[in-house]
Image (cartoon, rainbow, N blue to C red):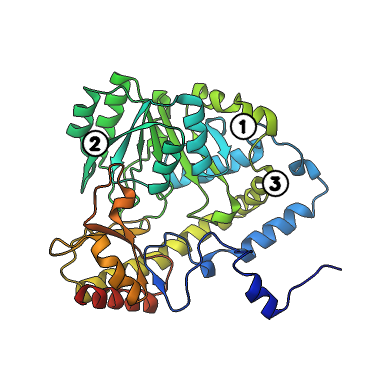
Amino acid sequence: MFWKPSASEEADLEPFFQVTQVSIPKDFIDLGLGDPQLALLPQEVIRQAAQDRLSQNDPGFLQYGANQGDGFFRQSLAKFLGSGYGSPVEPDSLFITSGVSMGLHLLCSLFTRPGDPVFVEEPTYLYALRIFTDHDLRLVPIQTDEDGLVIESLEENLAHFRPKFLYIIPTFQNPSGQTLSQERREQVLNLSRKHGFIIAADEVYHLLSYREAPPQPFAAYISAGNVISLGSFSKILAPGLRLGWIQASAEIIQRFINSGLLDSGGGLNPFTSAIVRTVLDTGGLEQNVAHLVSIYRTRLAAMDAALRRDLPGLRYRLPEGGYFIWAHLPQGLTAKDLQPSADAFKVGFRAGSLFSSRGGMQEYIRLCFVYYEVGELEQGIFRLKQALQK
């Protein structure tokens, strides 16, 4: 018989057995949290898919998996991505990962050495910076504006550095929400060929578009031979699956397949891949993405309306997709200045400096509109107004 703690025992054990990565205090509204809402995680879809897979008389997915990832799963994923991207995707161009973080770690392990320069957007995803720092890489910030990476800044830094790769979030960027224009995408591609660096494009938000379709993903350009597109099910299905993919040329894919990590442990996440394959084949993922887009579009509009009503002094550009609003604080205020007052009014945000490779962006904050429902978003913005007025 398995032990099941009582309600009081669960409360006592909670600090030691935390279920999720982030624990939000009671009555606190954390507008900085970049997670999907628990209520929107499709537990029933996953349950049915797991039940279907486990009912089959084939335990192969419990064995060490193929290094590149299960071929049937890659076929299903390629079909889904081809539909979402609007251009064909070949199963052999896909390598299955345990998410973008694992993909970035493998990229650093196989393609860089300590001290190598890598280019990053300013600002960029804070945990990518952590991974690059773990590998002792030299981070070179590239300026961005409302249309994404500034080409002149990229060219200027290429005159001084030979980067191993450029890490870029081209569509609905984290944290800024900006999208790199089609013209600039082509310019980045041309410069990467000319100077011999890899484009590592983090495209996890590409399918979460709430208005017009974004420009083609960098995944459409892998034939150039120096493009790596990283994707994940974390934002479109569930982060706890720890499942993602890399899309690249055959030569790059082979580097990943032949790594010592894969030789030792086999393909990443064969069990989860088998379950998600059923979700793909039954159309469950397409339905889930459509549902999320509908919900998130409404929440983005609600946060935008609340900000315009309660905080007209904040400057921001409304994103057309993704998770985040990147706001410039008024009157020379910094996120550090605002933090104590925000804590007092039980509202959270993420300080802009967390997303800077050089400790800049101190007058910015990142707000997320996907985790809370409309009423909580409005209450959170009102609390932020109170914090700014204190």
SS under mark 3: helix
- Dot 1: within a 10 Å radius of its alpha carbon, few (fewer than 14), some, or many (20 or more) residues? many
Question: Of the numbered discs in the image, which one, if any, rests on residue 205?
Answer: none
Say which label, 3 or 2, has the lower sequence index. Answer: 2
Task: Indicate the position of residue 332 as horizontal and vertical percent values.
Answer: 14, 60
**Foreground: 150 or 277?**
150
Q: Which mark is residue 68?
A: 1
Q: How far across and how far down the image is residue 315, in percent?
A: 18, 62
Q: Of the residues shown, which amino acid type is indicated by label 3?
A: Phe
Is residue 213 visible to us here?
A: no
Residue 101 in view, yes or no: yes
Q: Which residue is mark 3?
A: 271
N-terminal-most mark, 3 or 1: 1
Q: Residues within 10 Å of mark 3 (few under 14, many from 20)?
A: some
Q: Residue at x 19, y 65 (%)?
A: 314
Label 2 Cα crowd, 10 Å radius (few <14 / some 14-19 / many 20+)? some
Quadrant in the picture for residue 223: top left
30 or 192: nearer the viewer: 30
Q: Quadrant of residue 226?
A: top left
